[in-house]
Amino acid sequence: VISAQSATEDSSFSFTVPAGTFSDVDAGDSLTYTATLADGSALPSWLSFDASTGTFSGTPDNGDVGSLSITVTATDTSGASVSSSFSLTVANTNDAPTADSVSNQSA
């Protein structure tokens, strides 16, 4: 089981799936890893997954605030697989207000 994770808007996020999360009792089998959203769609553009290290990384922005359900799948050399899902919550930070230019006005 992979524990829930949290990230903060505009801050670098990194999380490595813990060693031992997946295993295979068959001698000689190696595991390959993939990650998707729980519905099978691709991860959001801000979040990448390095299958060789099992590491998620990225920097979410204001539009990414909210919760995601992510599924990691381990597949052995025979094609058998197992999956584990976890939630990733992106917390909001206060964004400074901005001043927009206004053209000169006449009365």
Image (cartoon, rainbow, N blue to C red):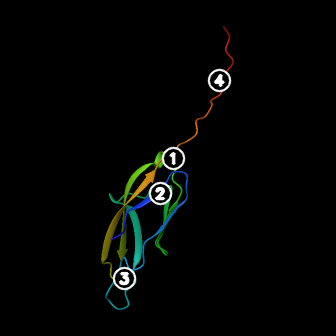
Asked whether the beta carbons under mark 1 and mark 2 sit within 8 Å of each other, the answer is no
Q: Which mark is residue 93?
A: 1
Q: Circle 2 sits on which residue?
A: 7
Q: Earlier in the sequence, mark 3 or mark 2?
A: 2
* 18 vs 26, nearest the viewer: 18
- Identified by mark 2, the residue type is Ala
Q: Which mark is residue 102?
A: 4
**Residue 83 in the image, given as x and y percentages of width and height:** 32, 70
Report the Cα–Cα distance between label 3 and label 4: 62 Å
Residue furthest front in the image: 94
Q: Which mark is residue 29?
A: none
Tag 1's secondary structure? Answer: loop
Asked whether the beta carbons under mark 2 and mark 4 sit within 8 Å of each other, the answer is no
**Residue 71 in the image, given as x and y percentages of width and height:** 36, 64
Residue name at image x 39 percent, y 53 percent: 67
Report the Cα–Cα distance between label 1 and label 3: 43 Å
Report the Cα–Cα distance between label 1 and label 2: 11 Å
Q: Circle 3 sits on which residue?
A: 77
Q: Earlier in the sequence, mark 1 or mark 2?
A: 2
Q: Earlier in the sequence, mark 3 or mark 4?
A: 3
Report the Cα–Cα distance between label 2 and label 4: 36 Å
- Identified by mark 4, the residue type is Val
Residue name at image x 45 percent, y 51 percent: 91
Residue name at image x 53 percent, y 43 percent: 94
Viewer-nearest of labels 3 and 4? 4
**Residue 48 in the image, given as x and y percentages of width and height:** 49, 62
